[in-house]
Image (cartoon, rainbow, N blue to C red):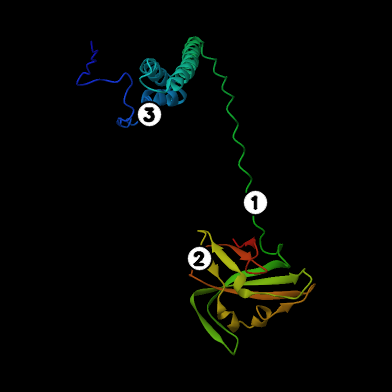
Amino acid sequence: MANHQSTPDSWDPPYPDHTQVLPPPGPVMPPTRPPLSTAAVIGFVLAFLLAPVGLAISLFALGRTGAGAQRGRGLAVAGTVIGGLFTVFLMIGTVNSIAEDARLAAAPAPDAPAAPPPATPPAPPAAVASPGLGTVVEDGEFTFTVTDARWIGRTVENGVFEQQAQGEFYLLTVDVTNIGDEARDLAHGYQKIYDTQGRQYSATDAWLALPNADRSILAKINPGNTVTGAPLLFDLPSGTDIDRIELHDTWYSDGVSVAIR
């Protein structure tokens, strides 16, 4: 009897068909990082600048970073510690300040120092009278002695020149000695007269018409020599109440006063 083996129409082999083409694998995505907590950064900065506010924000950031939803937990912890310490120091300083203010307010006021006795006003300095006619006075390298002072009218003349006064001529006669170590001129224009109201008058150029004009500005006086009777002429308002003459050896010297009254 013949043995016949039947073959099914489809048959799956026991091993996979390695000739099949599989699809390529998809791209591998990198793991995502949680965002940095803004509150942690702000809390850390404010912990140094404004401790109580920085402490509060850092505590809030601790809750936001605890579950890993946000980064910055280290900043939140640091802000909490630093802000807490600074806040404690601030509270201690405030309490001490309030206690000190209370202590000062409760302390009795110090006794006011006794008023010093009223000072005796110093006596006014005695008036020093200016030297007068005939007194030797000194300014710079010259000594002066006013020997005469008088009104001489409205006209002066010496046969060559004649001058008319605007007011009235006032003539002073002066002896001048050079006590320096070089020759010096007696400058007529350096000399000044003051009236009793403090007004100043300069010498006039009309001295050129005086008989002894050569003894004034034209006189160069050598060391140790004396010119006697040097005229100083002033054109003053009639009736001027003359107080003093101020004599100078140079235009920039301090001058020395001689009373005329």
Q: Nearer the viewer, mark 3 or mark 2?
A: 3
Instruction: Quickly name the residue at label 2.
Output: 240
Tell me how far mark 2 sits from mark 1, CA to CA: 24 Å
Vertical side of 7 occupied by 196: above or below? below
- Which of the numbered marks, if any, corresponds to residue 212? none
Vertical side of 215 occupied by 177: above or below? above
Tell me how far mark 1 sits from mark 3, CA to CA: 109 Å
Q: Is residue 235 left or right of residue 28?
A: right
Which quadrant of the view contains residue 250?
Answer: bottom right
User: Which class describes the residues within 10 Å of circle 2: few (<14), some (14-19), or many (20+)?
Assistant: some
Q: Nearer the viewer, mark 1 or mark 3?
A: 3
Instruction: Quickly name the residue at label 3.
Output: 30
* Residue 31, image x, y percentages: 38, 26
Vertical side of 143 occupied by 32: above or below? above
User: Which class describes the residues within 10 Å of circle 1: few (<14), some (14-19), or many (20+)?
Assistant: few
* Residue 247, image x, y percentages: 64, 66
Instruction: Decide which of tag 3 and tag 2 comes sooner along the chain.
Output: 3
- As rendered, which of 49 and 236 lies closer to the eye? 49
**Which residue, as the protein is rendered here, is positioned at the far left?**
9
**Which residue, as the protein is rendered here, is positioned at the far bottom?**
160
SS assignment at label 2: loop
Instruction: Quickly name the residue at label 1.
Output: 128
Marks 1 and 3 close (CB-CB < 8 Å):
no
Q: Residue at x 71, y 65 (%)?
A: 140
Quarter of the N terminus within the rendering:
top left
